[in-house]
Structures are given as structure tokens and as C-alpha cells.
Image (cartoon, rainbow, N blue to C red):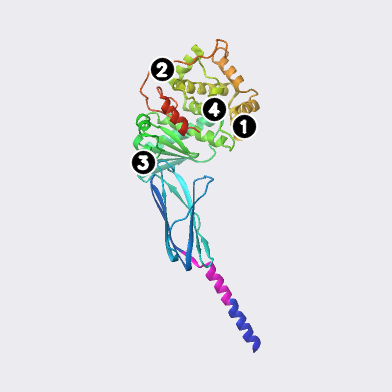
């Protein structure tokens, strides 16, 4: 009889222990977990939770896209068994690119030692001023608004064709899907870009820019939209193909490939290149590793980098170019990368290229003369800032500071 009572008592003790464990595990309950946002203004995260004990700690963890940095926030709330917490993330214009995936979760703790971490929630942050349509083909997803399907299909086809052209001519292809987000006007698109000052934005039109490793913004109604798509998608492809934690690829390669994939060289760039050959004012390849800071050299810079890529592809083939990009992905410096793939450095590249276009050897006709600034002209819009005649030094300084559209 005593053994039965002992077993019963043991059973009650075990039941009480199990019940306590269940209460400890299920002591905190989330009753609401929501978010809302206003484009380029704020994102609001809201939580409601309750527990059998007083909740005394709440932490929000959030991250944008594939960024390596995870952010933490500690919203203010009144400790109690039932709580409401809200965190407002105030945004600067262009701080988060449209099309970005944002993920977040909460950690809730009470005075009894219970802790609950919510499941990760992911949502896509889009420009909520517009109702978006989308089409996808291959690795391209195109978003647009206020236009019919024909408009979207035309731009999508242009994007797909430019990627196919890049793969065929250069030997490099897109590694993962890319988003092309199309705006209908300068004013609409401006709200998605980082502010660059009133004067700058009044004078310059951004036709396209890479705002994230997998996202391009496009001014889709401009007459140069097709060239812009080709240019910016090349930056995305090359950026992904050469991404490494050590160094960036030289501008002559990055911008040269983007210009080459646009198609035939623009007239203003071709004229500047011809003048540079004729007057022996060509920029050295070593000086082309970074964007020029001289307004008078802008058109020449882009004409030269196009010509350099054209020379390398026609002389050594796309297989070598593809290999060069793979070497840069390992973090090699320009001279080391060229030597490994082609067997020569930037000085020898400069010499071979000059010979191929009929320019005299460097230094043969004396020191290089800085070209005279062209007559002032009103900027005629822009496309990745590559073919803008008459740019002022102030505009170029901003260009270099923010690296608009260049990767």
C-alpha cells in the first residue's frame, strides 16, 4: 500500500516538474508581429507579447539584403505581463534601394528567465508610391509601372540581349538573378537615389545606376534606355564576377567593358579618342586605373577605355578576358593580374595598344600635353556619367565621392 502511495507521489512530482517545464517553455506568447513602411521615410516594426511573468527585455534584430552587418534595436516599452513595443527606423532618401529584401526577428525575455526568439520574417522593400508590374526571363527580373506589357517586354528583351552579348563577346555571364527597376521620369527616380544637392540634381539626369550588387535603377523612358541597360548590367556582371575583400578592379577594365557592351562607341568619345591620337595627348593606362578628375578628359577617358577593351578582345580573345576577371576575383593588383594572364604589365599594355591604333610610342614626341578645355556646353543629360560633355569639376568631384553607378 505504501509503495502505491509512493508511486503516486512520485507521479505527482514528475507531473509537476513536467508542467513547470512546459510553462517555462511556453511562458512567452507573441500576439502580434507586424511591419509597415513609407518609402525613403521610415520602416515601423511592431510587437505585442504576453507572459506569465513580467516581460523586461525586447530586442529587434534586422538586416538589409546580403549585407554582412546585422543591426540591433531596443525599443522602449513598459515592462508588464502584456506589452506593446514599436521601433521606427527613420530613413534618409535612397538609404535602402528599392527591391531590397529586409529580414528581422525579435527576442523577448521575462523576469522568470524565459526567452523567446521569433522566426525570421523577410519582406521586399519596394517604392510604395507606385503599383508595380513585373516580368522575368532568364536571370533578369524587370519591374515597371504606369505602362503596358509591351513597354515591359521591350526593356526586358533589351536586358536579356545585352547579357547574351556580354557572354558572347567577353566570355562572362551573370552569376545570379538581377533586378532592373524602371522609373518613368527623373523626378520619380530621384526619390530612390541618395541626395546629391539641389544644384547637382537640377543640372544632371541619372539615366541608370547600380544601387546594390544585384539591383539596377533605370530611367526607362529616355531615348538611351537600351544603352543604359547594357552599361549598368555589365557593371553588375563584372562586379559579381570580380568581387573580393581585397581590392577593386581598375577603372579601365570596369568602365571599358561597360562601354564596350553598349555597342558602337559614341560620337563624342570617338572624336576625343581621334584627337588624342592626333595630338599625342592620350592618357596612360596606369592613369586609367581610376576615373579622371579632369573635366577636359572625360570624353577621352571613355573613348580610351572602350578602345583598350576592344584591343584586348580582338588581339587575345574572350577566353583571356574571362580568365583576367577570375584572377581579379582573387584580389590581384592590375600589374600582377595582367602578368599572370597575358604575360605583360600595364606599361606594356599601353605600348601595345598605342601601336595598334597608330599612336606614336609614349615619350617619343616629348611630354604629354594636357588638352585644352573644350568650350563650355550645357550638359546633355547623362548615362552612367560616361558621355557627358562640359562637366564641371564640382560635378566630377561629386561623381568620384559617391561613385554613382560605378562598381
Query: Would you name the residue on which mark 2 appears?
Result: 374
Q: Earlier in the sequence, mark 3 or mark 4?
A: 3
Q: Which of marks 4 and 1 is nearer the N terminus?
A: 4
Q: Is mark 3 on a helix, strand or loop?
A: loop
* Comparing labels 1 and 3, the label whose residue is closer to the camera: 1
- Location of mark 4 (residue): 253
| C-alpha distance separating marks 3 and 4 | 34 Å
Residue of label 1: 332
Query: Quick one: 5 or 132, which is closer to the camera?
Result: 5
Q: Can residue 401 be seen in this view?
A: yes
Range of residues picked out in magenta? 15-29
Q: How would you rate the neighbour count of disc 1 (Cα within 10 Å): few for under 14, some for 14-19, many for 20 or more? A: many
Q: In this view, does 342 lie above or below 209?
A: above
* Residue lying at 51% horizontally and 17% vertically, measured from the top left: 282
Give the CA distance from mark 4 to mark 1. 14 Å
Side of 17 where 273 appears, left or right: left
Tell me which numbered mark, 1 or 3, is placed earlier along the sequence.
3
Q: Where is residue 262 in the image (x, y as percent from the top left)?
A: 47, 27
- Who is closer to the viewer here, 312 or 11? 11
Element type where label 2 sits in the image: loop
Q: Name the N-terminal-most of marks 2 and 3.
A: 3
Give the CA separation, mark 1 to mark 3.
42 Å
- Circle 3 is placed at which residue position? 145
Q: Does residue 185 show up?
A: no
Amino acid at each position: 500500500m505504501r509503495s502505491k502511495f509512493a508511486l503516486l507521489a512520485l507521479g505527482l512530482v514528475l507531473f509537476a516538474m513536467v508542467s513547470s517545464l512546459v510553462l517555462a517553455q511556453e511562458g512567452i506568447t507573441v500576439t502580434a508581429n507586424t511591419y509597415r513602411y513609407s518609402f525613403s521615410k521610415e520602416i515601423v516594426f511592431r510587437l505585442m507579447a504576453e507572459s506569465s511573468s513580467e516581460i523586461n527585455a525586447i530586442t529587434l534584430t534586422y538586416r538589409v539584403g546580403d549585407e554582412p552587418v546585422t543591426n540591433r534595436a531596443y525599443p522602449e516599452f513598459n515592462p508588464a505581463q502584456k506589452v506593446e513595443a514599436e521601433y521606427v527606423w527613420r530613413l534618409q532618401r535612397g538609404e535602402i534601394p528599392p527591391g531590397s529584401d529586409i529580414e528581422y526577428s525579435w527576442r523577448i525575455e521575462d523576469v522568470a528567465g524565459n526567452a523567446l526568439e521569433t522566426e525570421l520574417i523577410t519582406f521586399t522593400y519596394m517604392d510604395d508610391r507606385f503599383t508595380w508590374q513585373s516580368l522575368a526571363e532568364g536571370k533578369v527580373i524587370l519591374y515597371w509601372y504606369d505602362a503596358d506589357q509591351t513597354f515591359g517586354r521591350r526593356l526586358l528583351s533589351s536586358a536579356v540581349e545585352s547579357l547574351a552579348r556580354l557572354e558572347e563577346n567577353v566570355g562572362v555571364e551573370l552569376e545570379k538573378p538581377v533586378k532592373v527597376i524602371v522609373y518613368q521620369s527623373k523626378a520619380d527616380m530621384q526619390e530612390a537615389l541618395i541626395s546629391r544637392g539641389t544644384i547637382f540634381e537640377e543640372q544632371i539626369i541619372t539615366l541608370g545606376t547600380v544601387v546594390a550588387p544585384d539591383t539596377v535603377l533605370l530611367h526607362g523612358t529616355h531615348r538611351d534606355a537600351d544603352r543604359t541597360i547594357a552599361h549598368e548590367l555589365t557593371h553588375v556582371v563584372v562586379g559579381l564576377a570580380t568581387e573580393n575583400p581585397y581590392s577593386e578592379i581598375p577603372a579601365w577594365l570596369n568602365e571599358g567593358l561597360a562601354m564596350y557592351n553598349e555597342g558602337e562607341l559614341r560620337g563624342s568619345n570617338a572624336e576625343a579618342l581621334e584627337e588624342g591620337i592626333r595630338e599625342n595627348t592620350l592618357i596612360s593606362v596606369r592613369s586609367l586605373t581610376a576615373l579622371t578628375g579632369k573635366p577636359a578628359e572625360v570624353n577621352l577617358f571613355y573613348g580610351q577605355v572602350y578602345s583598350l577593351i576592344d584591343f584586348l578582345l580582338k588581339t587575345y580573345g574572350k577566353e583571356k578576358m574571362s580568365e583576367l576577371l577570375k584572377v581579379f576575383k582573387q584580389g590581384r593588383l592590375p600589374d600582377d593580374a595582367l602578368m599572370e594572364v597575358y604575360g605583360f604589365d600595364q606599361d606594356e599594355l599601353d605600348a601595345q595598344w598605342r601601336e595598334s591604333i597608330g599612336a606614336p610610342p609614349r615619350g617619343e614626341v616629348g611630354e604629354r600635353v594636357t588638352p585644352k578645355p573644350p568650350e563650355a556646353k550645357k550638359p546633355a543629360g547623362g548615362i552612367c556619367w560616361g558621355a557627358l560633355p562640359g562637366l564641371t569639376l564640382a560635378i566630377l568631384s561629386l561623381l568620384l565621392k559617391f561613385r554613382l553607378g560605378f562598381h
